[in-house]
Amino acid sequence: TMNSLHWTPHWSPQKGIFSELHSKVSEAGIPVTATHFDLQREMLWMGNYTGHVKSFLGPTMAHYSSFQVHATDAIRHIQSLETGVLFLSECNLRCYTRGGLVMFDYRMEKGADMHSLLMTDNMLLMGGLQNYVVEIDMNTLQETQKFTVEAPGVTIMRQTNHFFVFGHPSGKVTLRDLRTFRTQKFDAFPGGLSDFDVHGNLLAVSGFSSRGLNERFLMVYDLRMMRAATPLWVHVDPFFVRFLPTYTSRLAIISQTGECQFCEPTGLANMADIFHVNTNGHCFTSFEVSSSKQALAFGDSGGCVRLWSDTRDVMFNVYSREPCVVDAQPQLAWNHNLQPCSPIPTAQATPSSRWAPGMDPEIPQTIETVGFNSYVENPSACPCNQVPANKEESPVYYNHIPESLTESDEEPLLHIVPEKYRKVTIKYSKRGREDFDFKHYNRTLFAGLEPQIPNAYCNCMIQVLYFLEPVRCLVQNHLCHKEFCLACELGFLFHMLDLSQGDPCQASNFLRALRNVPEAKEMGLILSNYEETTGTVKLGRLIQRWNHFILYQLFQETQEQEDPRAYRTTRSSSLGSSGDSVIRELFCSEVENRSPCLCGIETVYSSLMLLFNMHYPDSQGEIKEHDFAEILKKSICLQQRSHTWCGNCDKYQPTVQTRNIRRLPDVLVINCEVNSSKEAEFWKVQAEKTDQDQRHVWIPATLKMSLSKSQRLEISSWPEGEELSAAEQAEGASLYDLVATVPHILDAGAGGNMVAHIKVGETYHQRKEGVSRQQWYLFNDFLIEPIEQTEAAQFDVSWKVPAILCYAKRNYHTKYDLRSECQHNQSEVKSDLYRTEKHSKTDATFIPLTVSEMPQAGDLVGLDAEFVKLSEEEAVLHSDGTKSTITPSQMSVARITCVRGQGPNEGVPFIDDYISTQEQVVDYLTKYSGIEPGDLDATVSSKDVTTLKSTYLKLRFLIDAGVRFVGHGRQNDFRVINLVVPKDQVIDTVHLFRLPYKRMISLKFLAWYFLGLNIQGETHDSTEDSCTALKLYRKYLELYQEGGNHYVTKVLYEVYDKGFQLNWKVPDSDMR
């Protein structure tokens, strides 16, 4: 045991005095080349000269993982991420999970000699012994740019709030301004650098003399004045330097021989602040400080890692996540012939000691341990790597479906859920979602749906409805005056999905309408903030209730008689234009219900059913094998005991109610009702009795269904790909193919989620890809991936619980009119755009278009939108001080302004709509939006308050007319408004006046610099902003005509220089 030179025992009770907690020998004789405290979890990482890495848990340094990263090259730098850990070697950057699985391997260009990493937001800088530093986008793993640096290169990199700091082997330190990219150099030591660190406005550097010896002083620089302060003389040979900022800006100075000294960077070093680490004759080769500044890690040339701290209850990070510990495994019975050298777990292994199976008591006595690996001769009791299933005990991987995601204390087999089925989240950077790589999750041209908005649990069923062609065409041709019509909003959303080329869409307008439908609230379909954040809702039951609700709502809304003012189309009344006939033909089953009474009178009534719920047999003992078709038939033709009113007896009487089907639908929708462990165990038993190559598949891909002459329903499984005979077709038999399944994913670690497997038809592939084919896909919010049909029908109820099944009659869509017309009526929208009458209380903030101003393709329209905040963002603060956005603030459009871009009235608004809202606004953002409380209330507002649907239709009309929208930073606005605008119809001045990889310039600064206008004084005004964007576009055209792209770039460099001088603030006086 080693003690500090303060003559204290092994553990010092004094705060601030460091002593050794633990030490571990990684691989004896192999130098430790890199150490790193994990920034997400209480773990310490080390990498050695042979490319091997190990990790240790907490202050006890319990072994966690060990794996080989590179076959020959040393580990030179380690950097932890939220999802994995980066390891840098000479010519490779590799990312591994904390358990040792490869996530990616990035190879450098030939001749690279990398030494250091620096993580900044979603960007990674890599430097080494070459004359450049590479910047990598971690979302796309693509090189974005290279910074040229002074030869021979960079070996150490640090960062402050204002600078990148590069350390060169030549002894120089370069500071690169994060805003201007201008550089400042310090010649610190003539013989080279050994280390440096930066904190606040202080830079401390250690290095060598011209003779190659350690200088016993540190160079200290004041970054505010950009000059050297008085050198700090020390009493050890400084090789490593780190700031330990707690109450003061202490420096830790470490020599290679184990001498350590603490001192203030602006004071004199004190001999009393020196302590010694016993290195057993080895040299220190790495040194690291935890983010909490409570722990120090030393790695030496002998392969030993030492952990020192100034407190017994040391924490590496202020906030850390729990490490993923190996889960408990079932007991294993060893009763077969074993081959020698079979790997077996040991009871002493950590952290997998809970895994230890039953074994021969003599086995532990023969175990030999080397490091923390144990070996034993196999007693040859059963085949290598195989154990029989223990059928006597109940399986541990599934006990019941938790009533909520927080009900179970443990997380059984979290790793069993495949990555593509887990809940996906958008990682937000300083630029919001712009840096997020959605293409990584979706390589298709179909559009996913974003999950971060409230009540997005229904994304899976929205996709199912979209890929039912008659439903898509029906809602896209539907339009009414009802403000919160779900059929209209689904049509608008499906139009977005049609236009998108793989980019995800938001269902925010549809979900906004859903929140305002009283029936949705009554059925509990609107989740509270608490239910959204804690995950206590039962998603499987919820999506089945939502399924019943949406089908009924579409049935009601599409058959309602429209009033004379409703938007009309020119469609005929053939099947496909009448909502009643489409929904009835698609989903409705005509059923007859019979209830015989004890008095002999039988009550008979008919009804329509949009879907059926599965009912499972009551089994007191062992669950027997059942055919799916048999269970489905009994669920449709249901017999159940109930009390029914008898008019003859004039009271309720016990009866057995029987339901018989009289007409089959084109699309059979089934709620699986697997809501408890009883139903789940039934599914599990049925799936396990199937063939081995069809494991966990109980539902057939095709069903044969028919109604006999006696009106009896017959259902049976049918071989896939085969057709009915002419005789069977004549008898009225039909084939139903599985087209969609919706499972509930049980993933306690991620909170659980809903996904959909959908068989996408030929017409969708033809429109998106230009090919005619059918393919199954997994839809997990914005993750879309092709899958096999078998996977869509597999339900391992330990993590994948069936919720909804959809069977469609083969070739059912041929009898429907599948033409989709524009979802707005031009005459109706024009009447809104051209109207001249104004409400008496409304201030005239715009002048409607005249007939001669009808928008034409290519016309310019200035656009600006203002938003209010419905909810605050949710973020987490990490131990390193960085912030990650979990859920962004929910915004709602409050004002939309369109101004004329040409003609005698150029710059005059023709749309200036304030959007009414019934939802609670938490922040009107008046300083930025100009919206005051009361402006959005139609009963008290003096503004032109209208519905979002009305304004949406006007914008859709302008988009379809081919106008070009001019605005500043409008791409996100279109997404929130739920509009997909072709890129060639958007002119965004924020991109016209921006240099590559530089910051975006505000509209206020550009208006001052180019136009001499001082806009956005106390508040923003959308009319002023849209007019200014139009003027800036005209200015850009002038610059381009004057000298082309080269001249525009030259002017932009001047703009950036001016902006950096003024810190991007518009001065009061004219300084242009």
Image (cartoon, rainbow, N blue to C red):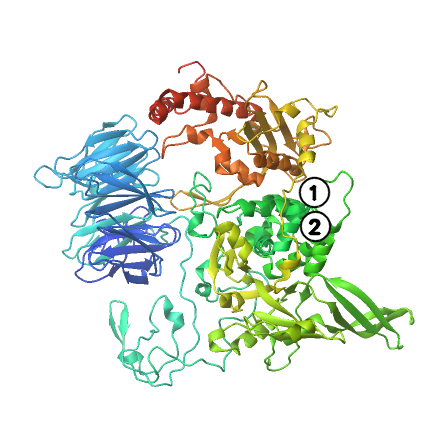
Query: Residue 1064: in sight, yes or no?
Result: yes
| Pick the front one: 598 or 1010 | 1010
Q: Give the secondary structure at mark 1.
A: loop
| Pick the front one: 754 or 2 | 754
Q: Which mark is residue 577?
A: 2
Give the answer, above or below, for where 961 lies relative to 847. below
| Pick the front one: 407 or 806 | 806
Residue 480, image quadrant: top right
Q: How many marks?
A: 2
Figure quadrant of the C terminus: top left
Other-residue count near label 2 (Cα within 10 Å), few / some / many at <14 / 14–19 / ≥20: many
User: Does residue 1 appear left or right of residue 704 in this picture?
Assistant: left
Give the answer, above or below, for where 581 lies relative to 960. below
Image coords of residue 422 (percent x, y): 48, 58
Image coords of residue 134 (percent x, y): 28, 42
Figure quadrant of the N terminus: bottom left
The reply to whether dot 1 and dot 2 touch (C-beta < 8 Å) is yes
Image coords of residue 995 (percent x, y): 37, 30
Q: Which mark is residue 569?
A: 1
Other-residue count near label 1 (Cα within 10 Å), few / some / many at <14 / 14–19 / ≥20: some
